[in-house]
Image: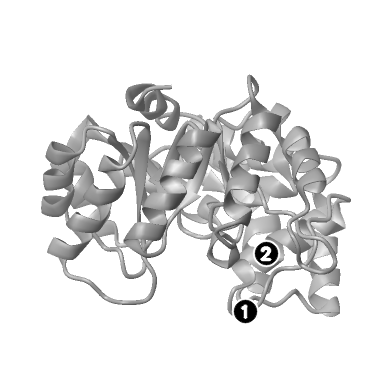
Amino acid sequence: MNPQELKSIMSHGLLSFPLTDFDAQGNFNAKGYAARLEWLAPYGASALFAAGGTGEFFSLTGDEYPQIIKTAVDTCRGKVPIIAGAGGPTRFAIQCAQEAERAGAHGILLLPHYLTEAGQEGLIAHVEAVCKSVKFGVIVYNRNVCKLTPESLAILADRCPNLIGFKDGIGDIELMSSIYMHMGDRFAYLGGLPTAEVYAAAYKALGTPVYSSAVFNFIPKTAMDFYHAVAKDDMATQHRLLREFFMPYLQIRNKGHGYAVSIVKAGAKLVGHDAGPVRAPLTDLKPAEMDELAALIKKLGPQ
């Protein structure tokens, strides 16, 4: 798949980030991960992001990463495209990108570098180095310490033909609107705030109708129903699901730091697709929180 083909895929449909399966000791569980992907693949996501943020990329070792990407590619071959997460320090991000390309992934989502702040010149150099290390498509994730401006993205677009996508995880409407007005159809755009459904209608109005769903990991039918409601401007369905599920879900998610990932693993466990515990420094939901989440899921009916 060339970068423009990936851009086309990124321009429509629902995307999601499968959880990474760990066993009781916290080690990568390839068999469980393959079973998870086989379960999710038929539900209709346009692409799946292996080892992304919800997949706990930030906790993976350099040895585990290639296994995870290869498992995803091999399991989903001919069913759904796989985009690999990559990130951290520039040289590690390059290593991940090249491993993903060798494994047969269709592109990468470039997650933020680790911890240290950087100016626009440094961010441009970082993204450019990763893009030039591979031939397949790259999607850059604006979040936390990686906050590229419209001017920086224009420079990168000129230098890196394979930079084809932009994902926003900041939620700055003025910045997002400015980027879209500045870059137009040069990029495919992806909404990527935690629990993206809450922001989906607003982002569609900004020219970003595509988003990534974390809840697809445990309520895939509802996730697809909500996406179709956004696509059709069906506000009645959106408001019903926001009121009955997503807003109460946010109340649970907001009870703990890092729960944006933990609550998804909890949901998967509750519906019979246990992905194991989260890795430190994340923490699993408490029993009472699990009960609250179970009650919300039950109201949605069969998935």
Alpha carbon separation for disc pair 2 and 1: 22 Å
Q: Of helix, strand and loop, which one carries label 1?
A: loop
Q: Position of residue 169 (x, y in %)?
A: 40, 58
Question: Residue type at mark 1?
Answer: Pro
Q: Residues within 10 Å of mark 1 (few under 14, many from 20)?
A: few
Q: Position of residue 276 (x, y in %)?
A: 80, 62
Q: Is residue 134 toward the left or the right of residue 181 in the image? A: right
Q: Residues within 10 Å of mark 2 (few under 14, many from 20)?
A: some
- Give me the residue at 78% from left, 53% from top: 29
Q: Which of the two residues, 300 or 265, is positioned nearer the viewer here?
A: 265
Q: Which residue is mark 2?
A: 249
Q: Quadrant of residue 10?
A: top left
Q: Is residue 184 toward the left or the right of residue 146 in the image? A: left
- Give me the residue at 70% from left, 77% from top: 283
Mark sitting on residue 182: none
2 or 1: mark nearer the eye: 1
Labels 2 and 1: the sequence-earlier one: 2
Which quadrant, please, contains the C terminus?
A: top right
Q: Quadrant of residue 238?
A: top right
Mark sitting on residue 281: 1
- Give me the residue at 33% from left, 24% from top: 4
Question: Residue type at mark 2?
Answer: Tyr
